[in-house]
Amino acid sequence: KEENVEVPEQEALIVVSNRLPFVLKKNPLTGVVERKSSAGGLVTAVAPVVVQCKGKWVGWTGNFYGPNEEPDYIPEADINDKTPTAGIKADQIVPVYYDKTHFNNYYNGCCNGAFWPLFHSMPDRAVFSVDHWQDYVAVNKLFSEKTLEAIHGVREGNPTVTPLVWIHDYHLMLAGNTIRELSENEGIAVKIGFFLHIPFPPWDIFRICAWDEDILMGLLGCDVVGFHIEDYCLNFIECCHRRLGCRVDRKNMIVEYGNRHIRVRAMPIGIPYSRFVQLAEEAPRVIKITTETVILGVDRLDYTKGLINRLHAFEKLLEHHPEYIEKVYFMQIAVPSRTDVKEYQDLKEEIDQLVGKINGKFSTANWSPIRYIYGCISQNELASFYRDASVALVTPLRDGMNLVAKEFVACQTGDPGVLILSPFAGAGEMMHEALLCNPYEIEEVAEALHTALQMPLEERAMRMQGLRRREKKNDVTTWMHMFMQAMESKLIKPDKSIMT
Ligand code: GDG
């Protein structure tokens, strides 16, 4: 698919995301600032296009600096860096720097304290503060100004180039409008697209936010607004209609705003499928070969992921089916996340206690029911876990998409396992061969576990084949192509199979 990327002369992609595709780290031995690249799927798909069209990437370096301490250069990639970001030259990076106070208000306060719970339809957890919002506005303005710098950069030497700006996620919902204004003031034509990685809530929830109007207007500054699934698109369209009085076309998913028509599109994100297959084929075994069956959970430690409900469901399974004692164990990998936020610290505490309680209740001399890793493992190890687990338990209470479900099926290269999936994840809308179950119904999840553990090989194989075929076809490169096509970009050859 990468071969489809043409060397474009007339467009240049500018990616705008809270974080750059790498963080800057000072090497403690040499004192030299180095890049530490991300291996995420989005970066894998998008970085090659940025490289080929001589585009730019606007984002935060992952560090805080005091006044006048900002580094005055971005290093080139290390020669041993084999990730797709390595091809991005230092002059293609437009860094954004924050000080810690602004960051706390904008990121922990507004993005993660207010928008994250609200957009996941958990308004009781949302805390709205004017101070946080003001910093959100300021950071979005800063990003917009940096994007204007990037726009100037790509037009340098060739003013006929059309900058194609791609803004990511809920951190930057105001930027589209400001970037449009700034560039229009200078008479520069730009195309602007936005993709939201989390759900967009229904109108009744969204209207709780005091700044709902500003957010909608920010997003409507774009030409294309993308979401994972159609439900989120329709929620957004409804909010534009109810809050701003926009005329909308729900069938063709278009919002009229001023004299512009904004295209709203469902573009479900995929994973770098072939990379995960390869990792699974090559990764050494991590889980010891025993007669025990492994149920696997992999999540950032976040209240949206439903970890407490999941642990209760596993407890119920052992209560109802003691035949699984010493035969099955549950391996949960929980990646530390937002650790400076009290709510996340409390959740960790609650999980620690519940894991202890269940292990205390059921453990025998040579077996305990739960193995719990609180930490980040390598992608090799992760692929090995995905491959060797018999059941993946992916039961978020609400999730934009959920990549773990997709990575699990990609890595199932051996004896086919079973995916148990929440219908409240975007992935639940399309991974039909999974066992879908409501994470709030603890008994239902326990029964789904029992069904999965008893499922005959033939049925497991049939379901897994369907799941794998879909993820292979709709991988992260397909997703990027969908976005480019919606932007009517010439960077990617039109792929007629995608939009049908
Ligand atoms: C947001 C939306 C949407 C996890 N543990 C380890 C590890 N991971 C990686 C997984 C996966 C990623 O983290 C988690 O992705 P999710 O999609 O499950 O969840 P969010 O982080 O909440 O992502 C979500 C996504 O954006 C994309 O649009 O699907 O709905 O919330 O890739 O592999 N990676 C490594 N070690 C771990 O221990 N190396």
Image: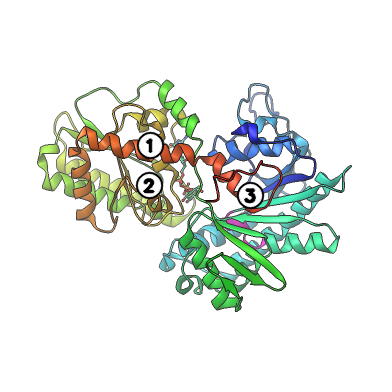
C-alpha gap between disc 3 and disc 2: 24 Å
Between tags 3 and 2, which lies in front? 3
Specify the label residue 205 is tagged with: none
Callout 3: SS: helix
Q: Earlier in the sequence, mark 3 or mark 2?
A: 2
| Residue ID for mark 2 | 431
Residue at (66% x, 53% y) in the render = 487
- Pointer 3 local density, CA inside 10 Å: few below 14, some 14–19, many at least 20: some
The residue wearing badge 3 is 485
Percent across and percent down for residue 365 are 14, 30
| Circles 3 and 2: CB atoms closer than 8 Å | no
Residue type indicated by callout 1: Val
Element type where label 1 sits in the image: helix
Amino acid carrying mark 3 in the image: Gln
Mark 2: secondary structure? loop
Residue wearing tag 1: 409
Is residue 117 visible in the rendered structure shown here?
yes
How many numbered marks have been drawn onto this rendered protein structure?
3
Is residue 171 a member of the stretch shown in magenta?
yes
Q: Is residue 165 magenta?
A: no
Determine the CA span between mark 2 and mark 1.
10 Å
Q: Is residue 301 left or right of residue 361?
A: right
Kindly identify the amino acid type of the residue bearing the numbered disc 2: Met
Residue 178 x, y percent position in the rendering? 73, 63
Give the mark, 3 or 1, whose residue is nearer the N terminus: 1
User: Which is nearer the eye, 261 or 286?
Assistant: 261
Residue depth check, mark 2 versus mark 1: number of the one nearer the observer: 2
The magenta span reads 169-175
